[in-house]
Image (spheres, grey):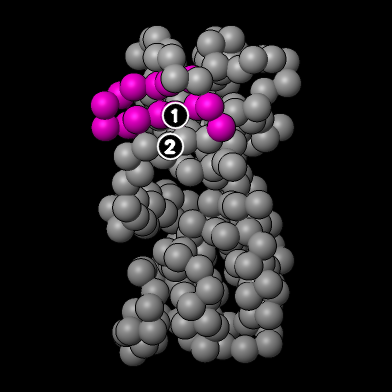
Amino acid sequence: MSVDILVVEDEPALSRLLLTTLSAQGYVVTTAMRADEALARVAVDDPALILLDLGLPDGDGLTLLPLLKARCQAQIIIVSARAQESEKIAALDAGAEDYLTKPFSVAELLARLRVAQRRRLEASPVTQSYVVGELSVDLAQRVVMLAGQVIKLSPKEYQLLAILAQSGGRVVTHAQLLQAIWGRHHSDDTHYLRIYLRQLRQKIESNPGEPRYLQTEPGVGYRLAAE
């Protein structure tokens, strides 16, 4: 399973708050309270972003930071009560992308996460084509083919399929899809997605009731199947 954010925080109340808040924003979130648990989680969850506290019960976050960087491609934001300039410099030198000092506002945290997401996307190679089974999506030419035949899609249908293709088999959450296609004021309008996914499946799937390509992650979002 892949997730958007791994929260590494040993304070239970703050960990629960971050889990609840970020999940409500449409992120797929998992948590760890110890350094060894965090290392185990990145191997399973492949997070895109990590929020890392420096004061962990089984080790210092500065020691954990390079170990996490060696095991995954996540953007790491330090979230710590340590406000000394030397601590911030040490964390950034060790590979952290950002440093947020406790206490912080939810609005500031979300802004930092958006910046980290943009950095990750800019650093990632852009997939120009996606092929799985008899389905191919040519993002450069905006052409979708199934078993060698061109499939005609509406602009919204194509945009939805292209986003899933660019995610390379990773789950894209309902909120992420809605914001990318319809804008941030429609992040709760999941019925839009159900309508367009149903239309796409009618055009692409041999059996829309048992989809081969457009897969649902119940309560989370959708993914385009990988080989």
Q: Which mark is residue 130?
A: 2
Q: Amino acid at mark 1?
A: Ser
Examine the rendering and report whether any part of residue 8 can be seen.
yes
Q: Is 149 left, or right, of 219 in this rendering?
A: left
- 159 part of magenta stretch: no
**Region in magenta:** 133-146
Image quadrant of residue 100? Answer: bottom left
Q: CA distance from mark 1 to mark 2?
A: 6 Å
Q: Is residue 153 above or below residue 169?
A: above
Q: Is residue 125 above or below residue 190?
A: below
Q: Residue at label 1?
A: 136
Which residue sits at x=64%, y=48%?
Answer: 20
Percent of width and height locating residue 185: 42, 24
Examine the rendering and report whether any part of residue 101 can be seen.
no
Q: Is residue 159 above or below residue 16?
A: above
Q: Quadrant of the C terminus?
A: top right
Secondary structure of the residue carrying tag 1 is strand
Secondary structure of the residue carrying tag 2 is strand
